[in-house]
Amino acid sequence: MAQSNNAKVWFVTGASRGFGALIVRDALARGDNVVATARNPQQVTDVLGEHPNLLAVKLDVTNEVEAAAAVEAAVARFGRIDVLVNNAGFGVLGAVEETSLAEARRLFETNVFGVLAVSRAVLPQMRRQRSGHVINISSLGGYGAYFGWGVYGSTKFAVEGITEAMSQELAPLGIHVTVVEPGFFRTDFLNDNSLVSTVARIDDYADTVGKMRDVAADLNHKQPGDPQKFSKAILQLADTETPPLRLPLGTDAIARIEQKHSFVERELAQWRELSMSTDHAAA
């Protein structure tokens, strides 16, 4: 069934809860068509109910076969994909040294390779259309690293770099790409079903990472960001004719970005002479 009128067709990963479920709900409410994916698609239906414009599809983002099948189902039902929201992901809280390779690999499988797998499945359809918008959900931790969030942040740094390159590659084909950098929003992200703490705990990190664990626990469900407003912002982003490459959301995200810019500028000025000393001498 092809889309009608000017309704967009969304493809949203991690759609059973959090940001994903809110985006799906708001897109449906305004008459768009949505392919909402989750490891258990019944959870999507349980949360959002049955809807004629909703297709709930099974998708583990780390499974390329499932990604291809989900895209095939989306196009069979709605005829196209206008907006891809790579939202599925989770966090790990712990010092870099405390994070085992197994924990890091699992995190990268979902947060990075999942984005790659789903994007690779969707992009052939968008290239055929010569249109589309890929929205990759990153984090303020993907722009500025912070103790306790190093390995998690590194997955989001990867998403930032992938997004920047994709934007350059796809712009000539009529496809937009944006990375969204949320600050702390009042979702369930800091719950134990979205945020995993490393198994290892090293006493020497008690004053840094240990305190960050306390901060995360105290901040849970007290975060400054409003998830409802986040969802509305994503819909506005999708409607923009010339969307940005990066979109920070939340005053805390903006502050973190500005702090990093200031630090980088000061450090660059301090070390400029050495930095410039390594070129070949002019002939």
Image (cartoon, helix red, strand yellow):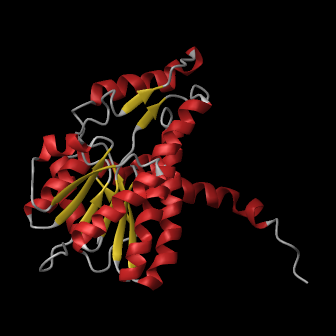
Residue 46 in picture, x, y percent from top left: 14, 40
Determine the residue located farthest toward the top in the rendered image. 203
Q: Is residue 96 left or right of residue 215?
A: right
Relative height, residue 62 to residue 177 (above, below) = above
Q: Is residue 249 left or right of residue 195?
A: left
Residue at the image point whose x is 28% and y is 64% from the top: 74
Residue 135 in picture, x, y percent from top left: 35, 63
What is the total number of numbered labels drawn onto the structure image?
0
Determine the residue located farthest toward the right in the rendered image. 283
Most foreground residue, 171 or 114: 114
Most foreground residue, 53 or 158: 53
Q: Is residue 138 left or right of residue 223?
A: right
State the image quarter where residue 244 is shown: bottom left
Relative height, residue 165 to residue 251 (above, below) = below
Residue at the image point whose x is 29% and y is 25% from the top: 218
Q: Is residue 258 visible?
A: no
Residue 30 in picture, x, y percent from top left: 9, 65
Residue at the image point whose x is 50% and y is 26% from the top: 208
Most foreground residue, 200 or 81: 81
Q: Quadrant of the C terminus?
A: bottom right
Q: Is residue 173 visible?
A: yes
Q: Is residue 199 left or right of residue 134?
A: right
Q: Quadrant of the N terminus?
A: bottom left
Residue 63 in picture, x, y percent from top left: 46, 48
Residue at the image point whose x is 51% and y is 34% from the top: 147
